[in-house]
């Protein structure tokens, strides 16, 4: 087996440092077969079966950069488990769904998901630099050539550039849309020119105030964030880039530098993390990740409860786990380091958030809280006559926006 030297990983690929730092080189040299990965990683039988299964499902693919971060000898490595398939992906658990978030039924035109009033999801590609084994859009991601038999060679639902004009036209005709989340696949798989054309088309729509780009490139292929890309993105402010990091070890020096380039270009960075059993399902692991993100100037935004996509039960935690983790974090790290815990409901009902309940009881003289250290703290009402504030035990009052 070839050892990948930590300080000079390009040597294991017989490449120069300049090639290694070229995002196109990383994309061209992505590892996507058992033979290729076995040059660098001691696979288990389970992983070999997983890679074989991936040929007819969500493809197996990992960039040399991300491969250089995984432990070649330890199948439990939290980075390895996110990109190397396991045989468990072939199993379907009760309640799992092909389209777990009901996106296809909330898609007025191909490539666009319109679930909420003011913000939409625009899917611009089905390709990624590497494929997360917990992918929620595994029904689409990874290209048409890999689709399951019986579903046809061509996956009609997969987003493609072809659909973009119609989706942009839809956004232009719907004045209520003020925030467009560009996702996929990974939008940073597009060339600079195509990305620029897309962003310019969105910016030309008066009522689109905010553009967001959801990407995992900062973890999988941080080389993608060139000075040129950063300069392009700068022109389309207010622009948010939503990164996807699940473990502190993904924040390699190159990823941290890429985050810095974006922030220095006026891009606001938020991160989403997927809660994954045995990978980051402990408070200490997430605390390390969230604190490292903040230092890299990325604000932890969402911690996602794993959805009901097919074949990912082995990653799923009980709902309690996320709530317990947030409770453990409160008071023990900066509030800035604590994201929202989101559950994206099936059937297109959208996201809701969960959080720990610090209220112990409510009685006539006030509310009894339990503080972050577990101590009881009664809080009398400051104004006993103004009790109609929607707190537990009081009459709820709906707050309306229209
Ligand atoms: C998550 C999501 C959004 C963005 O939601 P925010 O809570 O604003 O981050 C928009 N549309 C769809 C369909 C989504 O799944």
Image: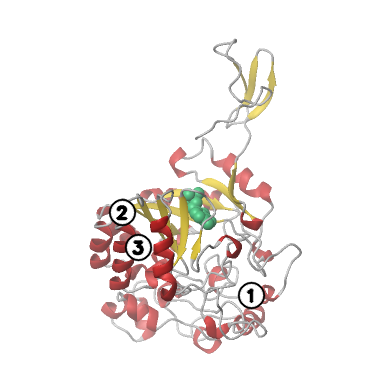
Q: Which of pointers 3 and 2 lies earlier in the amino acid sequence?
A: 3
The disc at residue 189 is none
x then y, percent, for residue 66: 44, 72
Q: Is residue 288 visible?
A: no
Q: Residue at x 39, y 48 (%)?
A: 294
Q: Residue at x 40, y 63 (%)?
A: 169
Query: Does residue 244 appear left or right of residue 374 in this picture?
Result: left
Q: Nearer the viewer, residue 46 or 153?
A: 153
The residue singled out by tag 3 in the image is 253
- Which mark is in front, 1 or 2? 2
Q: Which of pointers 1 and 2 lies earlier in the amino acid sequence?
A: 1
3 and 2 marks in contact (CB < 8 Å): no
When the figure is inspected, residue 238 is found, relative to residue 255, above or below; the finding is above
Tell me the crowding category of disc 3: few under 14, some 14 to 19, or many 20 or more residues within 10 angstroms, Cα based. Answer: few
The disc at residue 267 is 2
x then y, percent, for residue 384: 59, 10
The disc at residue 86 is 1
Residue 312: name its quadrant.
Answer: bottom right
Q: Nearer the viewer, residue 251 or 115?
A: 115
Q: Residue at x 46, y 51 (%)?
A: 119
1 and 2 marks in contact (CB < 8 Å): no
Tell me the crowding category of disc 2: few under 14, some 14 to 19, or many 20 or more residues within 10 angstroms, Cα based. Answer: many
Q: Residue furthest bottom?
A: 35
Measure the alpha-carbon separation of dots 3 and 2: 19 Å
- Which mark is in front, 3 or 1? 1
């Amino acid at each position: 087996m070839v050892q990948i030297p930590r300080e000079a990983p390009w040597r294991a690929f017989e490449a120069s440092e300049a090639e290694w730092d070229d995002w196109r080189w990383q994309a061209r040299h992505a590892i996507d077969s058992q033979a290729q990965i076995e040059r660098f990683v001691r696979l288990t039988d389970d992983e070999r079966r997983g890679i074989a299964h991936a040929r007819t499902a969500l493809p197996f693919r990992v960039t040399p950069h991300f491969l250089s971060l995984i432990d070649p000898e330890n199948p439990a490595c939290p980075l390895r488990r996110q990109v190397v398939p396991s045989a468990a992906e072939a199993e379907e658990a009760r309640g799992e769904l092909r389209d777990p978030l009901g996106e296809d039924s909330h898609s007025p035109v191909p490539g666009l998901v319109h679930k909420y009033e003011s913000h939409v999801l625009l899917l611009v590609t089905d390709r990624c630099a590497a494929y997360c084994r917990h992918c929620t859009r595994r029904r689409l991601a990874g290209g048409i050539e890999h689709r399951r038999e019986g579903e046809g060679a061509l996956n009609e639902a997969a987003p493609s550039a072809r659909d973009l004009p119609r989706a942009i036209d839809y956004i232009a005709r719907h004045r209520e849309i003020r925030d467009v989340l560009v996702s996929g696949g990974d939008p940073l798989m597009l060339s600079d020119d195509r990305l620029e054309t897309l962003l310019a088309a969105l910016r030309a729509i008066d009522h689109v105030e905010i553009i967001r780009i959801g990407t995992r490139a900062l973890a999988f292929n941080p080389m993608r964030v060139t000075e040129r890309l950063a300069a392009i993105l700068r022109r389309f402010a207010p622009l948010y880039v939503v990164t996807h990091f699940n473990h502190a070890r993904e924040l390699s020096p190159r990823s941290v530098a890429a985050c810095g380039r974006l922030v220095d270009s006026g891009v606001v960075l938020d991160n989403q993390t997927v809660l994954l059993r045995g990978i980051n399902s402990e408070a200490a692991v997430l605390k390390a990740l969230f604190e490292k993100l903040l230092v890299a100037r990325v604000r932890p935004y969402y911690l996602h409860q794993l959805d009901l996509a097919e074949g990912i039960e082995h990653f799923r935690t009980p709902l309690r786990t996320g709530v317990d983790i947030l409770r453990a974090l409160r008071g023990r790290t900066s509030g800035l380091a604590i994201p929202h815990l989101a559950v994206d409901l099936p059937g297109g009902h959208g996201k809701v958030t969960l959080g720990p309940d610090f209220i112990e009881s409510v009685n006539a003289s006030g509310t009894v809280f339990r503080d972050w250290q577990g101590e009881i703290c009664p809080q009398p009402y400051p104004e006993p006559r103004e009790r109609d504030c929607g707190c537990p035990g009081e009459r709820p009052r709906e707050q309306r926006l229209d």
